[in-house]
Image (cartoon, rainbow, N blue to C red):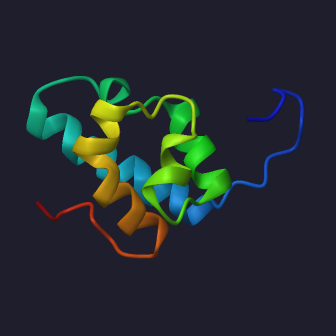
Amino acid sequence: MRCEDCPSEMDEGVYERLRSWREVQARRSGQPAFCVFTDKTLMAIAETVPEDPVELARIPGVGMRKLDRYGADVLAICAGQDRAEED
């Protein structure tokens, strides 16, 4: 994605919604939040704000398993929907 020293163009609102959603997902699955997605992956998602599964799959940390499991929610959050409390 970008170098560590480059300024970020991350959408802070998307990032915070993703973090809230991730916390719910981690709690439901009984695993640490970083197992859902790392902070770095959430930042990359919030920087690119993907609009479809192909764009989301290009982000490091989003493999096929996570795309299948979480892709619809992540894309909905990127589109402005609040999925933090939804199933």
Q: Is residue 77 above or below residue 21?
A: below
85 left or right, relative to 1: left
Quarter of the C terminus within the rendering: bottom left
* Identity of the residue drawn at 62% across and 42% down: 44
Q: Is residue 20 above or below residue 29?
A: below
86 left or right, relative to 39: left
Quarter of the N terminus within the rendering: top right
Q: Is residue 34 above or below residue 44?
A: above
Q: Is residue 27 above or below residue 35?
A: below
- Image coordinates of residue 31 in percent, x first then y, are 19, 23
* Identity of the residue drawn at 55% across and 65% down: 13
- Image coordinates of residue 65 in percent, x first then y, are 28, 32
**Total marks drawn?**
0
Residue reaching furthest front? 54
- Image coordinates of residue 86 in percent, x first then y, are 15, 65
- Camera-side residue: 3 or 30? 3
Query: Residue 73: which quarter of the image?
Result: bottom left
81 left or right, relative to 5: left
Query: Residue 43: which quarter of the image?
Result: top right
* Identity of the residue drawn at 59% across and 60% down: 49
Residue reaching furthest right? 6
- Camera-side residue: 59 or 45? 59
